[in-house]
Image (cartoon, rainbow, N blue to C red):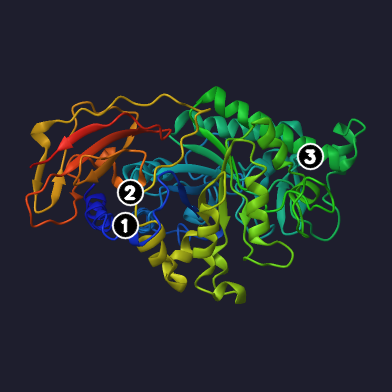
Amino acid sequence: MKQLAKVLLFTYGVFFLVNANAQQLPPKHEFRAVWIATVENIDWPSKKGLPVEQQKQEFINILDMHYRNGMNAVIVQVRPVADAFYPSTLEPWSEYLNGKQGLPPTPYYDPLQFMIEETHKRGMEFHAWINPYRAVFAVGKSSVSPSHITKIKKDWALTYGKYKWLDPGVPEVRQHTARVVKDIVSRYDVDAIHMDDYFYPYKESGEFPDGKSFAKYGNGMSRADWRRSNVDSIIVLLSETIKNTNPRVKFGISPFGIWRNKKQDAEGSNTNGSSNYDDLYADIRLWLKEGWIDYVTPQLYWQIGHKLADYTVLLDWWSKNVFGKELYIGHGIYRYNDAPWRDPKEIPTQLQMLRQTPNAHGSVYFSSKTFNSNPHGWNDSLRNNYYRLPAIIPPMKWVDSIAPNKPILDQSKVSLAQNELKVGFKNMNADVRNYAFYYSTENNITIKDTRFLLAIIPAAAINGAVIKLPASDKKINRYLKVTAIDVNNNESEAEEILLFK
């Protein structure tokens, strides 16, 4: 907790309400996340075979950076290729930890448990990112354990391009993935299960070799409709598995940015590119319409004004086709060195547009390591402008709408010295993730108004946390309201604090 205390002391120094009116106030509710990819050690661990303590410290450093930048969630890849970043009886340890698939960390620890605990300490959400079908990243090069599913169930595996895939057309494959998800949701305190765009693979040369399963299970459908039916089936199965195992856990998908083009479907977007529906056989719009998923994060990795897939066009299309579920936009920050993205205003302008778009309530950035170099000063833009004030993740009322009890202040733990406030509460509820503090020098605070939101403090760090108040050399009234925020981001009624007159 010492590391976290340092972060809190540093971070909340930028959450003053100084010059709040000089810049547009961020929304009170906003999802701000980053993808942390483990496949091929893209983001974490930085390479295979790192000592355990170095693995842990790298992840802590990643969290601290994103926490300072104003993020309130991370999406971490825990099952990149039918393997595991946690102990599992269903799949072997990932090769991206020790360099050989099947080897546990030495000395032993549970990376997933560690990551969840560190994330929750900072009041952030942890979304467990899995790949449903990708099984071997580089055939002939990747380490594959004798206990890997492609060795045990060889008839489930298909080679296409450089990858080996589990066949989406085999019902037992879907059941296996459901068992993996149930195992994660039943044993770990994850906030969501997250899947990206890898359903059926992107097209390589030749046809995806699923002729055998199509012949067996096709039931007279066209091959394309059958494939879409297979993907629909796993989405329904996983949705039911998650909700039946732990109803508070959310289910999110991050699809390729185009559902369908208008030339293919009148309901599609005014774009001209590959599509989920026709190329990946993922009918994401149907899943939203039927309520099978809780949020969608389309990968809008194109710049504003792109000739074939304009960010502006797609942002508008997704906002009109989310059917009451949450929409978070995926930003291609990794493209910072591509010609159109060398404009330092690209990401800030995308954020401004998103915030002005109905039904769009947040952002996710691919990927974490891009932030290490602070390209175009984008870290600074987030930290000092767009994310300079904290935000509460939008609650999903269809998941859980019951607000926690109002926090009851423990007056013996309240102290103020040199504009630094410390507090404590009598009713520390285990379901409370964060406490939100609202501040004013006038008795006019309403917790619905973003301009009063001073800080969000993780419940895990509330005892001993320092909340910095705007400096004053006068004896003035200082009013605060405090609310409790639960694990589904429902907010309680407010407890009032008058510090002095």
Query: At which x and y percent is residue 351?
Result: 51, 58
Q: Which residue type carries mark 2?
A: Arg
> Label 1: which residue?
20
Q: Position of residue 44 (x, y in %)?
A: 46, 57
Relative to 493, say whether 27 is above or below: below
* Secondary structure category for the residue under label 1: helix
Amino acid type of the residue that numbered disc 1 sits on in the rendered structure: Ala
Q: How many marks?
A: 3
Viewer can see residue 272: yes
Q: Residue at x 51, y 36 (%)?
A: 88
Circle 2 residues within 10 Å: few <14, some 14–19, many ≥20: many
Measured Cα–Cα span from mark 3 to mark 1 = 49 Å
Q: Dot 1, crowdedness within 10 Å: few (<14), some or many (≥20)? A: some
Q: Are marks 1 and 2 in contact (CB under 8 Å)?
A: yes
Q: Nearer the viewer, residue 196 or 52?
A: 196
Residue carrying label 3: 228
